[in-house]
Image: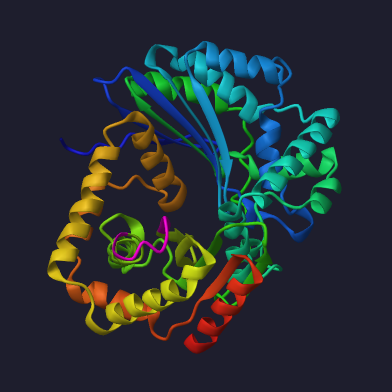
Amino acid sequence: MPFEKNLITLDNGVRLATVEMPHMESVSVGMWVNAGSRHETPDEHGMAHLVEHMLFKGTPTRTAQQISREIEGLGSSIDGYTVEDHTSYQAKAPASEFENLFDVLSDFYLRPVMDPSDLECEKQVIFEEIAMVRDQPAQWLEDLISEATWGENHPLGRSITGTEMSLDAFQRDDVLNFFRRAYCGKNSVISVAGNIDSKKVEDIVSSRFESLHEGARIACSAALDPQPGHRFEDAEDQEQTHLALSFEGVDRLDPSRYALKLLNVILGENMSSRLFQELREERALCYEIQSDLVSFDDAGMLQIFLALSPGNLDEALQIISKVANELCKNGVTETELAAAKSYLIGQSRISLENTASQMSWAGECLLFFDDIKDPEEIHSRVAETSLEDVHKAAMRLFEPMAFSSALVGPVDSEAIFGNWRRAMF
């Protein structure tokens, strides 16, 4: 099937992508704002996430309860999230309900009340969210590894949720100022995929969003060179040690990103990966082992996450060293590379069969690249990646063995890890 771009830009800068899928029964809608935690000033730590929460708290014509009831009454569900470089609101409903669904979504995106009493209430909700993260080492580790990599004084190194102290200081005017600066036409992307008529969707979106002020693309601090930092949190009450290692990768525009994606699959993304097979399947040292890629416009990281009994930590670290060294020395095999290509391309094609993934693909392409990429062009770039390309990516990643790290666990684990880490540098 030929790839078609359905893309328009409103006079105020709002970018809209539509994907017609007439064989589907559903429609998925996404609204993105190109503002996340890295767009905050030091005095705004946690503001982007707080604004996301406040958008659900009511408009001049709908209370928070009415927003939930109307959306769920359409057979829909909605989710919002904030990350370092953007905030997103996404919903899925029967295709026949698109106009009603978008009426609610556009209302809370464009006209949040930001009532002072609701603001204080939502601060308490986020305090509970922060406490919940601290009680879940695997989640807490994500904040710690970011701080270790970028430093606590850089936006990429600060937690997305903010702190009790930073949230306490926010007043309604502070929240409104950030909202008005970030939620403007130039910063907004809308994507709709499903059993829709693109022209009708364009008319509906245009009529709702034409009143949004144009504004300007919001600026953020440039990423620093990653530092080989380390963070440790003593958790004697935990039965497992949770560890994260972060290696410098590439930004989302770097030509070598395809090789790094394939290397990540072979290293630790799936059950066939070297780390999963050696650490879990062959030696039963852990239940959970995963490698992931993090990419921004100007930086990127490959991260390894591991949870295991403290007594297994030393052996697991030696295996991680061995796998990294082997990848640097010998690269990957033809069999591994062929399987990784099939995995990436196959997972992408399967995912794009549903409306939510098509919506996300189009919306994130607009957000990050200002264009909608043909998935098959991306698949071709993956397929063309050579053994040499992946070997170069491995050597760039692991040679020299420089990384940041974070550990949540007992003091004994920190001592074991410290000995290993010093041997690597």
Determine if the magenta segment contains residue 97: no
Where residue 356 sits, quadrant-wise, is: top left
Q: Is residue 180 visible?
A: no
Q: How is the image coloured?
A: rainbow
Residue 250 on image: x %, y %:
41, 69
* Residue 392 vs residue 180, the one in the foreground: 392
**In percent of the image, x 85 and y 46: which residue is there?**
168
Give the quarter of the figure containing the N terminus. Answer: top left
Residue in the image at 64% along x and 70% along y? 231
Give residue 82's position: percent from left, percent from top.
59, 45
Q: Nearer the viewer, residue 411 or 365?
A: 411
Residue at 65 percent of width and 45 percent of height: 182
* Residue 26 figure quarter: top left
Region in magenta: 281-289
Rendered view: 365 above or below 150: above
In screen coordinates, is 94 left or right of 112? Answer: left
Q: Position of residue 101 (x, y in %)?
A: 51, 18
Whether the magenta-drawn stretch holds residue 283 is answered as: yes
Instruction: Name the image quarter holding residue 20.
Output: top left
Task: Evaluate whether residue 170 shows in this view.
Answer: yes
Residue furthest front in the image: 311
Q: Is residue 197 above or below residue 138?
A: above
Image spot of residue 48 (x, y percent): 67, 46
Nearer to me, 48 or 277 = 277
Q: Residue at x 33, y 34 (%)?
A: 6
